[in-house]
Amino acid sequence: MQIYTIKKLLEVPEYKVTEIISMTDTEIHIKLEAYKKKKNICSGCGIEHRRGYHGFRRVVVEDIKLGKRRVFLHLAKRRYRCPNTWQIQIEEITWLKKRSRVTKRYAEQVSRLTAITTNQEAGWYLGMDDEKVYRIDKEILEEKAEELLNPPPSAINISVDEVSYLKYHRYLTNVIDTDKRLVIWNDKGRKAEVLDRYYEGIGNDNCKKIESVALDGARTYISSTNKYAVNAIIV
């Protein structure tokens, strides 16, 4: 199989295939190198850096199969001292999944499989440890949930209450749309600052549309509600 053909099949922007390290009936290992004009995006601040080079780290990531062969990509990730955070950060590669040794398209494949079967069976089919399948699927679900909740959904009539989810006074603050009878937002903690984050997320215009807020009498929640939802009736 020609290197140029493999490069077209892989679709890895800003990288070129330089070597087929090994190829068996079940696996193929491919070495990639970045083009000289590749932008170096910092994973810490998301800004391109041209200075602060601090070496590199070689990694092996898994991609979707080519035929019956599992594909493993060998590449070097550059490390920089970020001028904004002054911490050592690794460059961000657009087609790689953060904090996982897989490509984004492979992670999406894992997520689709876990939607119709168990993590154990998905791991068996892909040849992966079911614990790794669980971590990848969890991260994707968290990202999708964050997209749906950013900005937070607003409501006209809401109820606010806290619930304990762990021992030693670990609480979640829940905001419920009483018309839909649905939890529309929550966050860790039970102070006014926690509820403030919800009001700030929906914005002043949506705060003014709130007609009623059901509370349990906690002073912190009442002060937060009076601060933002000035037109609401506290019940």
Image (cartoon, rainbow, N blue to C red):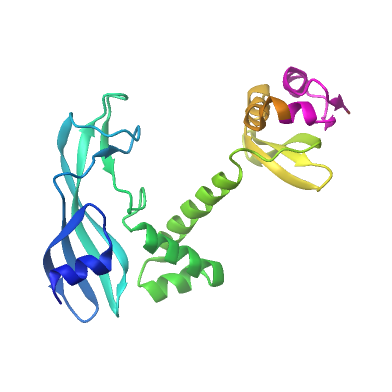
Nearer the observer, 33 or 86: 33
Residue 161: x and y, percent? 76, 35
Coordinates of residue 219 in the picture (x, y in percent):
77, 19
Tell me: residue 85, above or below residue 186: above
Residue drawn 15% across and 49% down? 35
* Magenta segment: 206-234
In the rendered image, the vertical position of residue 203 relative to residue 29, given as above or below: above
In this rendered view, identify the residue nearer to me: 118 or 58: 58
Left or right: where 72 falls relative to 227: left
Residue 38 magenta-drawn? no
212 in the magenta segment: yes
Identified at 29% across, 79% down, the residue is 67
- Tell me residue 154's x, y (percent): 72, 38
**Quadrant location, the N terminus:** bottom left
Q: Residue at x 32, y 25 (%)?
A: 85
Position in image of residue 109 (x %, y %): 43, 66
Q: Is residue 198 left or right of residue 27?
A: right
